[in-house]
Image (cartoon, rainbow, N blue to C red):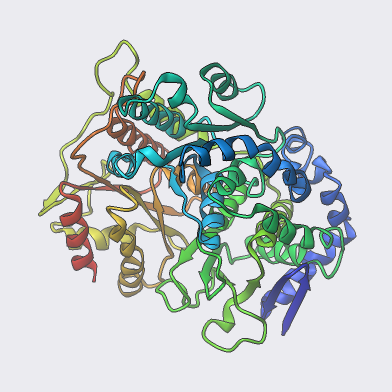
Amino acid sequence: MTSVVTAGGISVTIRGVVVDESETVLDRLVSDGVPGSLTSRNAKLWGPDAAPLAARRLGWLALPETSRSLPDRLAGPVGEARGAGLDRIVLAASGGTALAADAICRTAGAELTVLDTTDPHEVSAVLAGGLDRTLVVVADDGVEAESLRRVFGRAFSEAGLSGKEAARRFVVVAEEGTALERTAREVGHHLVLAEPDVDARFGALGARALVPAALAGVDVGTLLDEASALAAALRQPYDNPALALGAALGSSALGTRDKLVIADHGSGLAGFAAWAEQLVAGAMGKDGKGMLPVVVEDVGSPGFELAPDLRRVILGRRPDEPGPGREAGVSVAGPLGAQFLLWEYAVAVACRVIGVDPFAEPDVRQSRESTAALLRSEEGTAPTVVLRPPELVEGAVELHAPEDGLGGAQTLAEAMETILEEVPEGGYLAILACLDRSGDAAVAGLRPLLAARGAKVRRSPAPVTFGWGPRYLHTTGQYHKGGPENGAFLQITGAVADDVPVPGRPYSLGELQLAQAFGDLRVLRSIGRPAYRLHLRDREEGVAQLAALLG
């Protein structure tokens, strides 16, 4: 059986048994009046405890219209940047903001350098890549963005810019009344006010994501037109693709299919799957509930195969298109602006179905607080990080295991099989790479290799996810700590050749990166998750060694 729901340029196709499951949930959503209540911004949809926060987080529903003023508000910074020859836009942000802006620019073919990292190798490469043409957009007040603002500020000064000239090399996007907004005004940065009722996770069509895209030359008006075309259908009880998708996600999470495998199949939406991953994981993964998003390379990749606890979504397939993966269950096609709004609405609906607050992040602060505790204070002299000797060293790779050890493994190959076997039944393995996304890009190839190896050594294969650090702290980190207690974790760190000091702070980027990695690892172990760390004494050699071992 197949159900196809089309409106506003979006087509959602649901196949097989999921049709019956989601239709039952859909009927309940309609009888409860959810479509009208959500579009009317009823903050009580997720229960009385969630209402106070929800009342301050539903502005994303109006963004297709309220964001239309951005081009006019950016006229000054755009004109000044073009007059100064600043055609290289660098975004310092994290989480949904960074991933939305990245997807927008990659899909449009516009150049945007996204820095949501503290890796000194990656940052150094960007600093060396054309500072004289660079305009930096700072779009959040997290430790990564603030550290990068300081690092680029010093770099501009060392390049010979005056204090005023250096300050005008920044565009800050911040809510009124925040410390970042006050800093921008005091220092003299360009300032664009962000919406006060939109968070980064649901803010793909808001100022934080659209400002860097617009500065990079993207026609954001087209993106908003695409979203507006869908917005008219969101109030409808039927012929509403966002409601249908939300019912499918919610019914899957309520049942046994709590893993959402996402594969792109010619959608043309570069980077969109990563943005959807952070939305699904962060909004739904709490109170021991949720769906684990598993982004795979394509429909033929290891990890996409059929399993009883997987729900599959293909991005880009049309309902009548032949080819692999038609058994996936759900396929979604449509333009980027509409896709952003579709998924935000659908995930908000799915959160109501499973009974969680989509806007709360109750477990994110654990890693943030653990990181802060590991960083040296202003009076201290070193980060409070105790480095235990590795349990195993082979070539360029060190393996650090929990206190209960490696289960008798004597070689790295045996240890990797032990890690795969440690994944709980019905659980998953998350690879967390605290490395350079550009220079160490090959490490992402370990995901399909471990998925394929797991299929050989386990009775029931476990999904394998991949995340860059510290990005994953803001994307899937909430799910890792707050979702179902069935994850195992393999963190990968690497030696730092040339560190970058953070002006005005008692730590370098390398020390901050290490504290973020150790802080998260400590939290995972404290709540009983199997968590291992691979440290690459030489990054290139270590990645090649692991790929050869697993290949």
The C terminus lies in quadrant: bottom left
Q: Residue furthest bottom?
A: 322
Q: Residue furthest front?
A: 83
**Left or right: where 235 falls relative to 467:** right
Q: Residue furthest left?
A: 395
Q: Position of residue 493 (x, y in %)?
A: 27, 45
**Left or right: where 6 falls relative to 324:** right
Q: What residue is shown at x 77% (from left), y 62% (from top)?
A: 230
Q: Position of residue 288 (x, y in %)?
A: 57, 48
How many marks the image carries: the answer is 0
Determine whether 25 is above or below 327 in the image. Answer: above
Q: What residue is shown at x 41% (from left), y 75% (from top)?
A: 301
Q: What residue is shown at x 80% (from left), y 40% (from top)?
A: 43
Q: Position of residue 515 (x, y in %)?
A: 33, 32
**Left or right: where 229 falls relative to 378:** right
Determine if residue 4 is in view: yes
Determine if residue 286 is in view: no
Determine whether 176 is above or below 275 in the image. Answer: above
